[in-house]
Image (cartoon, rainbow, N blue to C red):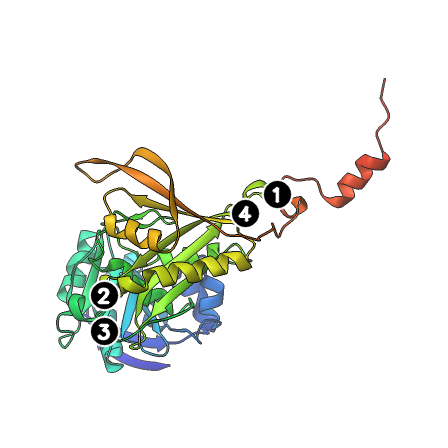
């Protein structure tokens, strides 16, 4: 833990503590995504995510906090989340002091890009003051002075990318990929209903939780600079009768489009390991380059959903592409699913165990 003191415009002394998980007594005093709160704040994700929390105190009382999340190994990009100031202490400059401390800490590790989102105009003014500007949807981005032409260079081709399983450290890396202006696919991320002009930051958390317990998989393309240039996530349907079907959603930056079919093939291998027989991809009919990519990976157009999406000017069909995987059998029995009779219930029905007598 490190501390510094800032004099607020009210004359009060704000003590800023920079804390790192596990947060111990501060767990209940800061914000975090509900889906990952216990694991992150108790230090179980530090192998992958470097997550300093900046906590402001006046006379020992927590009056504000915020954090950023960046890969433990590279620390080059990050997402800022859970900016909060206690209501009775607002308009004192607390959030501004915390943000200044946050950016200085991020830059100390040569960080170059931070992402956040807001729908609050007052917060937007604060972020503008600290160098953030409007980027995708309700999202904003800070670029360090030495970031250069970030959108052109960060995901540029730097050699063949490798395919690996996603980790929690890919949360900020995926935010760069999905918040990048290219490719201009209308369906950016199908599971989280992320469209062309929708920012992405927190959506990765939901994806990682949805694929747990053999419900799916998330694989990424990582280039030699340790940047995520492609990602593919698949999730099976959650019923006994549909468990052999999974939806696949993916994104690949233009500089690595040639490896797109390779990424999809790797996702298909993951699906086979999960006893999934068919993968289905939903693609807007306007996105010809995406259709070309899935066809190269062996997917075949199976259905057309007419006027499924609207881009603000036009109604657009959505195409369903399917890849059938051979020699796969279902992995789960009926009793594994909610609403189905359990073995002990089946036994009682079969033998008439404890059958109630007719009261008449």
Q: Earlier in the sequence, mark 3 or mark 2?
A: 3
The first of marks 2 and 4 along the sequence is: 4
- Locate the C terminus and report the quarter of the image it occupies: top right
Position of residue 65 measured from the top left corner of the image (x, y, whole percent): 32, 66
Instruction: Identify the disc placed on residue 338.
Output: 1
Q: How much space separates mark 3 and mark 4, taking CA atoms?
A: 47 Å
| Label 2 or label 1, whichever comes before in sequence order | 2
Residue 357 visible in rendering:
yes
Residue corresponding to mark 3: 103
Q: Nearer the viewer, residue 43 or 302?
A: 302
Query: Relative to 173, is 297 above or below?
Result: above
Label 4 Cα neighbours within 10 Å, binned few <14 / some 14-19 / many ≥20: many
Marks 2 and 1, how far apart in space? 44 Å
Image depth: mark 2 or mark 1 in front: 2
Evaluate if marks 2 and 4 touch, with contact meaning CB atoms under 8 Å apart: no
Q: CA distance from mark 2 to mark 4?
A: 33 Å
Q: Residue at x 31, y 81 (%)?
A: 3
């Amino acid at each position: 833990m490190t501390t510094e003191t800032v004099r607020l415009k009210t004359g009060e002394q704000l003590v800023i503590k920079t804390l790192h998980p596990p947060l111990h007594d501060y767990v209940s005093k800061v914000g975090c995504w509900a889906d990952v709160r216990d694991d992150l704040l108790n230090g179980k994700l530090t192998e992958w995510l470097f997550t300093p929390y900046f906590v402001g105190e006046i006379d020992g009382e927590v009056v504000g906090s915020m954090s950023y999340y960046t890969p433990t190994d590279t620390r080059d990009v990050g997402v800022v989340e859970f900016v909060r100031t206690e209501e009775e202490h607002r308009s004192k400059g607390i959030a501004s002091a915390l943000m200044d401390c946050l950016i200085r800490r991020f830059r100390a590790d040569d960080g170059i890009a931070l992402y956040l989102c807001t729908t609050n105009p007052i917060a937007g003014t604060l972020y503008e003051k600290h160098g953030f500007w409007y980027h995708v949807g309700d999202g904003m981005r800070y670029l360090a002075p030495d970031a250069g032409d970030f959108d052109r260079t960060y995901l540029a081709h730097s050699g063949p990318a490798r395919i690996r399983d996603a980790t929690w450290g890919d949360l900020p890396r995926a935010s760069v990929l999905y918040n990048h202006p290219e490719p201009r696919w209308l369906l950016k991320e199908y599971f989280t209903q992320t469209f062309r002009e929708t920012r992405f930051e927190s959506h990765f958390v939901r994806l990682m939780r949805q694929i747990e317990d053999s419900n799916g998989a998330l694989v990424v393309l990582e280039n030699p600079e340790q940047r995520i240039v492609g990602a593919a996530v698949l999730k099976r349907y959650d019923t006994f009768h549909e468990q052999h079907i999974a939806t696949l959603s993916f994104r690949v930056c233009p500089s690595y489009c040639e490896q797109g079919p390779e990424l999809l093939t790797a996702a298909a291998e993951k699906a086979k390991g999960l006893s999934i027989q068919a993968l289905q991809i939903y693609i807007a009919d306007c996105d010809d380059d995406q259709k070309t990519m899935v066809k190269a990976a062996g997917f075949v157009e199976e259905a057309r959903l007419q006027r499924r999406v609207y881009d603000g000017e036009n109604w657009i069909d959505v195409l369903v592409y399917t890849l059938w995987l051979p020699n796969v059998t279902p992995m789960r029995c009926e009793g594994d699913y909610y609403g189905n009779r359990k073995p002990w219930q089946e036994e009682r029905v079969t033998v008439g165990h404890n059958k109630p007598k007719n009261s008449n």
